Amino acid sequence: MRLINQKPGRSWRISLAMLPFALLLIAYLAGSAARLAENPQDKLLPSVTQMADAVDRMAFSEDPRSGRYLFWDDTAASLKRLAMGLAIAAVVGLCLGILAGSLPLFGASLSPLLTVISMIPPLAILPVLFIVFGLDELSKVMLIVLGITPVIARDIEQRAREIPAELLIKAQTLGANTWTLILRVVLPQLLPRLLIALQLALGSAWLFLIAAEAIASTDGLGYRIFLVRRYLAMDVILPYVAWITLLAWLMDLGLKRLTRAAFPWYEGGRT
């Protein structure tokens, strides 16, 4: 049997999925043990014990200065900003995508504009956002919004253009006006694609969030990472990076499950 036709079973699929992570963990533990054996004061590759102590200090011990649990406060601050940015980007991106993809008069102007805006590096305009919106929460949220909204809008626009014309024609023969077409025909077709677009934009949203928090913030996961880097505190940085990765993965999984639960017909319709 050709290799391209061989499909692993469930147990093999789980084992193969875990294999690269296990190899990376083994490689890290071996490298950490070798460096610490040579120099016990080495900070580049901390041991599991050192990272566990750092997590205990940050997450389960009150900060002597503020009396807060810094790990959870940072997590709550970052997730709040991220949720606001994703929610605003989803609504604005959906509206722009529908206008550009379903209404030719709007699409003639919006489509080129969205294309140009999506090419602007969001991090390049971060100083502008700080000047316009200040150094508070709004500028951080706006960076996420400006960073991922054009991408979501272009994705929704493309999906709107792929809706079969027969559906729109049949609805119009039944007396549907433009508003009814958008609400009853176009929107239901685009909502599952919106969730998928959010999945694809999650990585970029986290990137913009961490960048904004690193430059101007007093709390947040990105702020903490860049604060402790001056002390070469890898025992703090690595757990924070792992925690961000876990949160992003859980959000991706949640959106995927939500898409399947809310729109079970979507996968079958695509195939």
Image (spheres, rainbow, N blue to C red):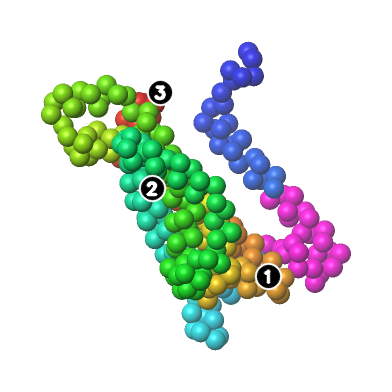
Identify the mark nearer the N-term, 1 or 3. Answer: 1
- Mark 2 or mark 3: name the one nearer the start of the chain: 2
How far across and down, in percent of the image, does residue 269 sit? 35, 26
The residue lying toward the viewer, choosing from 251 and 63, is 251
**Residue 103 appears left or right of 66:** left
- Side of 217 where 4 appears, left or right: right
Q: Quadrant of the C terminus?
A: top left
Instruction: Give the numbered dot on residue 238.
Output: none
Furthest residue in direction top, as rendered? 1
Answer whether labels 2 and 1 touch (C-beta < 8 Å).
Answer: no
Whether the magenta-drawn stretch holds residue 193 is answered as: no
C-alpha distance separating marks 2 and 3:
26 Å
All told, the count of numbered labels is: 3
Q: Secondary structure at mark 3?
A: loop
Mark 2 residue crowding within 10 angstroms, few (<14) / some (14–19) / many (20+): many
Residue 70 sits above or below residue 267 on the image: below
In the image, is residue 212 above or below residue 157?
below
Quadrant of res 212: bottom right
Identify the magenta region: 25-48
Residue in view at x 41 percent, y 34 percent: 158
Under tag 2, what secondary structure? Answer: helix
Residue type highlighted by circle 2: Gly
Q: Which residue carries the number 3 mark?
A: 271
Return the residue nearer the eye: 74 or 84: 84
Label 1, residues with CA under 10 Å away: few <14, some 14-19, many ≥20: few
Residue 46 screen position, x and y as percent = 72, 64
Magenta-span inclusion, residue 45: yes
Question: Any mark on residue 93, and which?
Answer: 2
Q: What's the mark number on residue 229?
A: 1
> What is the spatial separation of the Cα atoms under label 2 and label 1, in whole angstroms?
36 Å
